Image (cartoon, rainbow, N blue to C red):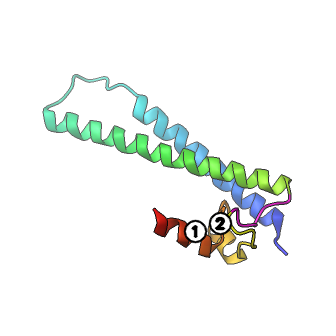
Amino acid sequence: MKDLKFYKDKLNKKKEEFTNNYEINRSLSTSERDEVAGDLVDQATDDYNKEFLNNLSKSDLNTLRLIDAALERMTEDEYGICLECGDDISEKRLTAVPWAEFCINCQEKKENEE
């Protein structure tokens, strides 16, 4: 039997971590440069860094959505059940990726299809 408190604590800790990272990245990517723009290389580097931070926060937001969905499945007594085949997701997988939606077999099938 899955220790829901263990996974819930793990999900909430990860959610807090992603939320903090998102806020930091958002403030860095939207901050305006106070000094006059440097040469083109400096400007290109700055643009690349902002793009990287923006993409990172999009990835974090996706993970946050998965975490929220996992917490919702807990309230519906559906946590740890593969959304594809209905089998239990292994505790080893849930420990590594507590927001996992699919068992390892279904996850591999989805990745191979993409």
The numbered dot on residue 107 is 1
Q: Residue at x 32, y 42 (%)?
A: 49
Q: Residue at x 40, y 28 (%)?
A: 31
The reply to whether the magenta stretch includes residue 80 is: yes
Label 1 – label 2 distance at C-alpha: 6 Å
Quarter holding the C terminus? Answer: bottom left
In the image, 57 versus 73, the foreground residue is 73
The image position of residue 73, as x and y in percent, is: 78, 55
Q: Residue at x 81, y 60 (%)?
A: 78
In the image, 111 versus 64, the foreground residue is 111
Kindly identify the amino acid type of the residue bearing the numbered disc 2.
Answer: Phe
Residues in magenta? 77-83
Q: Residue at x 54, y 65 (%)?
A: 110
In the image, 45 versus 80, the foreground residue is 80
Mark 1: few, some, or many residues within 10 Å (few <14, many ≥20)? some
Mark 2: few, some, or many residues within 10 Å (few <14, many ≥20)? many
The reply to whether the magenta stretch includes residue 32 is: no
Quarter holding the N terminus? Answer: bottom right
Check contact, mark 1 vs mark 2: CB within 8 A: yes
Of callouts 1 and 2, the N-terminal one: 2
Q: Is disc 2 placed on a helix, strand or loop?
A: loop
